[in-house]
Amino acid sequence: MTATQAPPVRIGKAAVWALGMLALATGALESVVTPTLPLLQRELRMSPAEGALLSIVLLITGALITPVAGKFGDRYGGKRVLIRLMTVVCAGGLVSAVAPNLPVLLLGQILQGAMVGALPLSFILVREHLPAGEAKVAIGVVSGLFVGGGMAGTLSAGPVAEGLSRHWMFALPTLAVIGSTMLVNRLMPCDPPGSSDDTGIDWPGLLLLSGTLVTLMLVLATAPDLVSQPLVLGALILVLAAFVAGWTAVERRAASPMVDLRMLARPAVWKSCVLTFVICVGTSVPVYLVPQLFAVSSDAYGFGASATEIGFFLLPGAVAAALAGPIAGIGARRFGSRAVVTTGIVMMVGALIALAAVHTEVWHLVIGKMLIALANGLCVTAMVTSTATSVDRSDTGIATSLVLVTRVLGFAVGVQASGAILTAATPAGSDVPAESAFVTGFLIAAAVAALSLLVARTMNKGVKE
């Protein structure tokens, strides 16, 4: 704070609860696609690979926009940027609500991805306007309501989509986002810019990373259909390689890179990135495959579950994911980060193998998905803690951004590869893939997750003395 700046205005409980209501509404809007994805695929005549693409575009947009939102928040003020981000989110929700086809729905989801950058800005605002002790409580409230919103969206999306229409499952939480954004705008005081950083935004790096992610998703989504057209597939792979090479070159030379690749030379950072990628691949495969298996007709080998039933079946996994953070924190303090990560990996591998071997009852999938969600939460929390404490304080943000990009890549690759496997295993004229495709997907995810044990065993124990 400079000598000419007034101290920040202290906010009351009403402003904190307005941020909490915004987190609740955005959490609900973010979570409606997962339980209703089979329904959306039927109504919009999507292939499994196209459905996989729909389920990850929001996350990709969020990973790209979050670092930019943070810099803009420092430069122009957190409230100002937050309100503008939420305006984009509201526009995306309305586009998704009226979408008549997949391209328009994809556009809506891309715009909704701005919400990923909004939650960190909420934390910044709370820390700016409250003393440290009260800020921790307020951040806990906002975080808890975001998780609660995700659970509410998971449960309500199916009944709304089936009782009203798929349009209303986007429209209702979007209306809640609009209302809570107006409350935040009214109750939250404006904050001055928090930094005079004039290094600028790494726009070339952002654009090249966007191109890299989009091209990677296209390669994975279209690979089953392009096997018979090797020249087209080869051209896409060459474009992908060009984007990767260009992005790497730009980030190595940028004065203020979006992702500082030089940090990868540090063992603690590259190990965390490798583990994050592999574990997110292992997690994302069942995240996509389990709802698809629930929805397969009971006349075949599935359960013919409705969107409402799928949301109910997925709820235990959401609860397990919410509990994983505190459990991992306690475990890391007592036994060390390496022990927590190793435990999580072993649990995930065991659950994936069990799903591949036995998936003939609903409870098999519910328990398996719950264990995988818990394992993922244990691993991610322990790795973030390990990374944050293994680098200098000034490098925490850079290391975290690398882990964030790696997490998105792992999740996107796992989901899109799962969609490609189902698409390739679906006979012509049918919308039911072969059961062996699910077994293959679970086993591949288990093998990939098991390989991460080779890296996990080299981690520092991370036990706090």
Image (cartoon, grey):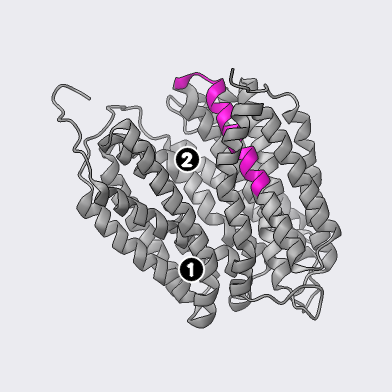
Residue ID at (20%, 43%): 190
Q: Nearer the viewer, residue 188 or 77?
A: 188
Q: Main secondary structure of the magenta part?
A: helix
Residue type (three-letter) at the residue carrying disc 2: Leu
Question: Which quarter of the figure has residue 112?
Answer: bottom left
Q: Quadrant of the N terminus?
A: top left
Answer with mark 2 or mark 1, whichever residue precedes in sequence: 1
Q: Is residue 424 left or right of residue 377?
A: right
**What percent of the width, then of the height, locates residue 13?**
26, 48
**Which quadrant of the structure image shows residue 266?**
top right
Closest to the observer, 374 or 286: 374
Q: Residue at x 52, y 46 (%)?
A: 210
On screen, residue 416 above or below 465: below
* Residue at 53% across, 51% down: 59
Q: Which residue is mark 2?
A: 206
As helix, strand or loop, the secondary structure at mark 2 comes to helix
| Amino acid at dot 1 | Val
**CB under 8 Å between discs 2 and 1:** no
Asked where in the image residue 410 lies, by quadrant, the reply is: top right
Q: Which residues are magenta?
A: 374-393
Please check the rendered image and state whether residue 18 is part of the magenta-colored stretch, yes or no.
no
Percent from the top left, x then y, of residue 291? 67, 65
For residue 387, side relative to residue 297 (left or right): left
Place of residue 304 in the rendered image (x, y in percent of width and height, measured from the top left): 71, 77
Residue carrying label 1: 104
Percent coordinates x, y for residue 332 in the rendering:
61, 30
Task: Decide if residue 146 is on the left or right side of residue 457.
Answer: left
Q: Is residue 385 magenta?
A: yes
